[in-house]
Image (cartoon, rainbow, N blue to C red):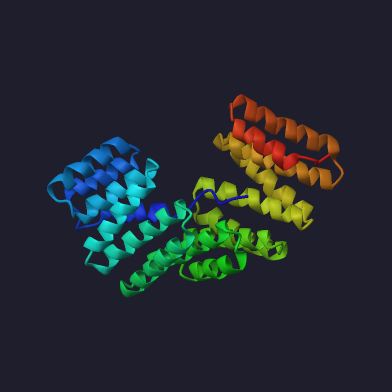
Amino acid sequence: MKLQITLSSIVLALFLNNAYAISPESQACNQAFEKGDVTAALAQADKILSTNKNDKDALICQGRTLAAKGDLSNALASFKLANAQSTDVFDKTISTLLLGNTYKSLKQYDAAISSYQQTILNAKTANNLSFERLGHNAIGDVYFEQNQLAQALPEYVLGSKLAANDNERGESYEKIALTYHNMKKNDLALEYQIKAYLMNETAGTLDQFAHSSIELGRYYTIEKKYISAENVLDKIIKFAKEQGGAYVEAQGSYVLAKVKVATGDIPTAKALIEHAKLIAKNTNDKLLDEEIDQETKGLF
């Protein structure tokens, strides 16, 4: 049960691609990166830095590209230099956020939290609630990754209070719900997952809506609200079939199988799992097949 869709990279990409003060060359670097052409992005960054080694925008693009290639140490060096060259407080908000992300990837958690805390301070100074929210969510993610759930929860709650729209609220509520679930407080997990579902139903992407639906079905099942679980799972399975979402259809099917087992309908449960396994086979999705096996182990 993990949140697969996050808004932080989307918000960051939108800012970097629309920043009014960025040079055309650095903008081209960012756009190449967003298109997935890391070779072109890195070449563009290197070209800019060959004439101006302190160009903060090129350093940021270089760092993001290096991080995408797995070269985290050199990415960290680029972000540190970009932060040192930044004089505007919002530029520093960006660089400290990226530093935090890199430290987190390196599992240097104390340094990551310190960088994210600086991001929050910078964002407050810049009066930018969006990046202040990202900072709190990022700190929550660091604590969550270390299973320090009591520390993660208040960060996610702060993030939810800074949300500017239903899309952001949906993301925050999902994080809160999953944290409560891992704390074995599934009544509260269900409460927040319902909120997330309602937000994503109206404002989320198709992926976000699908994920919210599956998780809501899980929590309803855990809380033995089987009719509600079946209703939401039937709805998302039908939606997935109509939209061609085979992965979501398989997920919905094996979660619905758990509902059927709980209500004593073993034949239907077995048929649902067989259907999910067939989807994994037909789509050659080995990870999905393993997920189904793991999720349904010992079900019968």
Q: Is residue 285 visible?
A: yes
Residue 266, position in %: x, y?
85, 38
Viewer-proximal residue among 226 and 202 = 226
| Residue 126 in picture, x, y percent from top left | 30, 71
Give the side of residue 269 with respect to residue 117, left or right: right
In this picture, residue 284 sits left or right of residue 272: left
**Quadrant location of the C terminus?**
top right
Tell me what residue is drawn at x 62 percent, y 25 percent: 282
Horizontal side, residue 235 vs residue 157: left or right = right
Provide residue 241's location: percent of width, then percent of height: 61, 35
| Coordinates of residue 48 in the picture (x, y in percent) | 17, 46
Q: Residue furthest left?
A: 51
Residue, x 60% and y 41% (percent of image)? Answer: 239
Residue at 28% over, 61% down? 83
Residue at (37, 72) in percent of width and height: 121
Vertical placement of residue 29 versus 93, above or below? above
Residue sitting nearer the eye, 65 or 114: 114
Figure check: 218 above or below 152:
above
Closer to us: 179 or 72: 72
Report whether 122 appears left or right of 172: left
Residue situated furthest right in the rendering: 264
Marks counted in the figure total 0
